[in-house]
Image: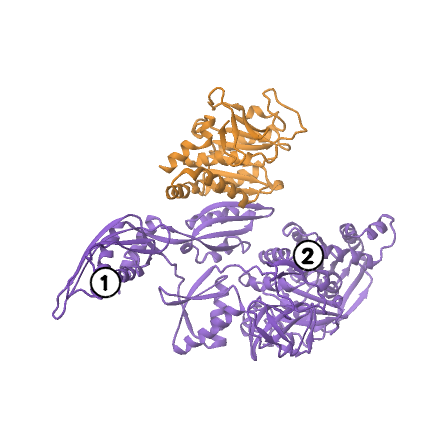
Chain colours: A purple, B orange
Amino acid sequence: MSVDLSNVRNIGISAHIDSGKTTLTERILFYTDRIHAIHDVRGKDGVGAKMDSMELERERGITIQSAATYCNWKGKDINIIDTPGHVDFTIEVERALRVLDGAVLVLCSVGGVQSQSITVNRQMTRYKVPRIAFINKCDRTGANPERVTAQLREKLGLNAHMVQIPIGLENDLVGVIDLVTMKALYFDGDNGEVVREDVIPAGLQDKAQAKREELLEAVSMFSDDLMEVMLEEGDIHPDLIQDAIRKGTLALEFTPVFVGSAYKNKAVQPMLDGVAAYLPCPTDVVNMALDLNNEEKEFPVSNDPADPLVMLAFKLEDGRYGQLTYVRTYQGKVTKGDTVFNSRTGKKVKIGRLCRMHSDEMEDIEFCGSGDIVALFGVDCASGDTFTSGEISCSMSSMHIPEPVISLAIIPVDNKAQINMSKALNRFTKEDPTFKTFVDHETSETIISGMGELHLEVYVERMKREYNAEVTVGAPQVAYRETITARAEFNYTHKKQTGGSGQFGRVAGYMEPLEEGEYEFVDSIVGGVIPREFISSCDKGFQKSLVKGALCGSAVTGVRCVINDGAYHNVDSSDVAFQLAAIGAFKDGYMKAKPVIMEPIMKVSVEGPTEFQGSIMGSINQRRGMIIGTMEEGQYTVVEADVPLSEMFGYSTILRSLTQGKAEFTMEFSAFKQVPKLVNDELIKKYQSERKNG
Amino acid sequence: MGKKNLVMNNPLRILGLEKKVQDKDASMGLVMSRPGLGKTAILVQIALDSMLWGDKVLHVSIGESFDKTRAWYDDILALMGSTEKADSFQTTVAEILPNRMIMTFKETGFSPIKLEERLGDLVQQNIYKPVCLIIDGYDFQGGTHKDLEEFKAFMVRKGVKMIWFSATTHREDERKSAAGVPAPCHEIDDLFDAILMIEPKDDAVDLKILKCTGCSVDPGTSLILDPSTMLIQKA
């Protein structure tokens, strides 16, 4: 591999689901001689596309994990990350964008700019990733690349202009016209591998000329030289146009639009030329690291292989041979056998094996330099860790990780499944920071949480397939709380005489709401009416009462229990007797203290096209949500609201259907608030009927 | 008790402005000043007053972020509540916050028609029915008498009883109406029932009442904005 960084391109391919980006990647690998046969995503040959290496991906025809691969095109080393299109897997897209220098935004010529294209575009803008657009599927009925280009401008606000126009559309698509060189390109051979240049068909001359002028007008502002030649009405050399397009693209002020059909093997190679010509090399972009020795002050990494190593682990995979860690090197170089430091843990790590990945196949390499994306073997780390050579202490800027929005309880079917499930959960949480798991001590269930129903569904599926962990999935549970709203006295005597030594204890005092904290016990006993040794028994008894409230069986919080009176018996009083007396006292006082049920309220932020604002607000209103505000930003509106968690289950599906899949939402915990009377009564009724039925 | 106290102690009481919302239909108010003197602070005090009376307020912020707008409320509420008992004040705040909704627009994306559309979404679905509108950041340079009349008309259509605007004046533009209302509102001052003007004077910030049909300030009272809190005070 060459070390000239100007010949390196780290690119991502991202788009809406089903835009054909995996097919496009497959063709890229074919044309760059990385694979020697083409397999379709849902192909009849049963092989599946190269990049969809996970069994589940091939079955569903969607890409779940972004497999990294490498190819060489006309002397340029291209590292490609294929990214998933479904919104639930957005973290994969975000992580890919973090380590990439440029991206190809793939769009369907029929579907146009869809919701995920909008999300991905926003992410690209956030990470300042220069992009080119490829309007795929121009062979489909209803294909209209010009309309899609207009949408790129209107919906995404990009300064997008076609650098190619198609020759024919739908079934008649035969090639493209390159507006920079003003040549027609045809793709001959069984798989379109032979690119043939020709003159522009007579019928398309005028259109091509008009489109070229549009393009020149748009890009001339990025190059004084081009502007000058245009003013002088001289011959414009293609290099001059390419240079202007590159400048505009790198400055994120221009998006060149390519057209074609990957499935029909049309115009993939010119798009690759575009990647080489217009997308940045590692030295064209500035990446910032945080100096851990200087209050995390940002500094730019140098990209210089001679400088100390800075390398980011952006993705983990559990491969057949152990943990595979995908890394991007930002400066310095790493050679097989080197020892590096993990900035987060401070631990030394030896690089035993270094590989260049080609989906699930690999190629051993001796070293990798600045700007490279490769995989390490057997390195214990978490996603997002930074490795350095130890001479400097820094971390790459933290990645934006959205909070999980949905939780499910999972129950292993047997002991074996329990062990395998633990292994699987341990692996998944390391691989994917948006996937979280914990044991709910109240219900003793294992809860998994993630970015959406499909996200969790895929992990449950993977548990079964990869770890043989059969689990049953429960309905999502909301953690309600109970609390009291008034002060109430209690006085309870526990007395039992059933032969042998009896039980006796009297506990009196009051309970009151506690402003801050969950529980407080105050001992105001004077004169030894309850002996010292039984005071802690009272505390224990109260604490046991807090585990399950009498209203709906949820934990009780925000209670101060004060004991100020009591009685004991020299023989019959014991630890157990006073615990039971305190439990009885709590019961005695609790219902008088006007208990209420509290529910978790989530801060919900829904983002979608302005045209759906009314539907979005309506859907929040129906969920007992309180809309705090709306923010209208061009074509987009964000609605912020406080909504009870119990009303949010299934919301992603409802939101998708309400907004044609164009809106998305995030939510995070905000506070516990009292449930309305109607819900309160329902919860009490439900709990009572559960108790009745055992 | 907290809520009543806050109503009584609202700095607006100094203006003698009573609960104007119920008085009559479609009243419009205006707060004017050069940039950065506290127009938003006064608008928020007016909004909070309505919220405390139990009226629903829609705060429309043009060219300002949602978080910044919300921060204005948090700050002024904290100042107003500094003399209250913490727990009862928190209860009051929790009680009145459902009476506020914030809507932000980009400068280029706002028009009375668009606002009416959005308001329609809220009212028709019975989500939120504001009676008081705060419109902060409206561009009066671009607005005409007709546009403002349009606001009045849609107030009637949507059941809004009061709108308060802010308008930015500029030192170099010396145009004024007969009533002394400066540009850019000198030709539309007839449409407003109340116009307040903030003016810097030495170390203080004066609050002048250029026009107010419902105000009853005691004779000789001059009002200022406390520069550290932006709350209305007697000089």
Residue that label 2 marks: A145
Residue A485 located left or right of residue B116:
left
Q: Is residue A32 above or below residue A525?
A: below
* Separation (CA) of disc 2 from disc 1: 81 Å
Instruction: Indicate the amino acid at tag 2.
Output: Pro
Instruction: Determine whether, in the image, residue A149 is placed left or right of residue A419.
Output: right
Depicted A426 relative to depicted A257: above or below: below
Label 1 lies in what chain? Answer: A
Do the residues at pointers 2 and 1 share their chain? yes
Q: Secondary structure at mark 1?
A: helix
The chain under label 2 reads A
- Callout 1 amino acid: Phe
Quarter of the image that includes the N terminus of chain B: top left
Q: Which mark is residue A534?
A: 1
Foreground residue, B8 or B113?
A: B8
Q: Quadrant of residue B66?
A: top right
